[in-house]
Image (cartoon, rainbow, N blue to C red):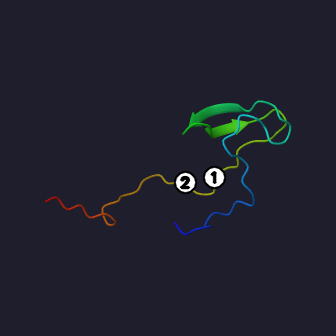
């Protein structure tokens, strides 16, 4: 992926437990990699929906493994 290939106008989350809008504790539907996951707040703040989803991939054409 090229640098800055994403289209987020601003980052809405940076490892936080609290809502950046109102300061309340965020509610997590699930947590993945520490505090990254699906989160929301009573004030309406929530994680942005992803624009793309990877359903499968194959590394075979990109990686060559040699054993000696």
Q: Residue at x 72, y 53 (%)?
A: 11
Establish if 65 lies above or below 30.
Answer: below
Q: Residue 35, located in which quarter of the rendered image?
A: top right
Specify whether 56 is left or right of 13: left
Residue 65, image x and y in percent? 24, 61
Q: Look at mark 2 in the image and give the residue it sits on.
A: 53
Name which residue lies at 70% across and 44% down: 47
Quadrant including the C terminus: bottom left
Q: Which residue is mark 1?
A: 50
Q: Secondary structure at mark 1?
A: loop
| Quarter location, residue 27 | top right
Residue at horizontal 32 percent and vertical 66 percent from the top: 61
Give how far across and how far down residue 56 sits, in percent.
42, 53
Distance in Å between CA atoms under marks 2 and 1: 7 Å
- Closer to the camera in the image, 58 or 10: 10
Find out whether the residues at labels 2 and 1 contact each other: C-beta distance under 8 Å: yes
Q: Residues within 10 Å of mark 2 (few under 14, many from 20)?
A: few
Q: In the image shown, does 3 or 54 lie closer to the viewer?
A: 3
Q: How many marks?
A: 2
Q: Residue furthest bottom?
A: 2
- Examine the image and state in which quarter residue 5 appears: bottom right
């Amino acid at each position: 992926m090229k640098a800055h290939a994403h289209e987020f106008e601003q980052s809405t989350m940076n490892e936080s437990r609290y809502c950046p809008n109102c300061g309340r504790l965020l509610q997590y539907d699930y947590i993945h990699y520490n505090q990254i996951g699906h989160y929301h707040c009573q004030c309406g703040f929530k994680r942005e929906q992803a624009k793309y989803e990877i359903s499968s991939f194959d590394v075979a054409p990109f990686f060559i493994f040699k054993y000696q």
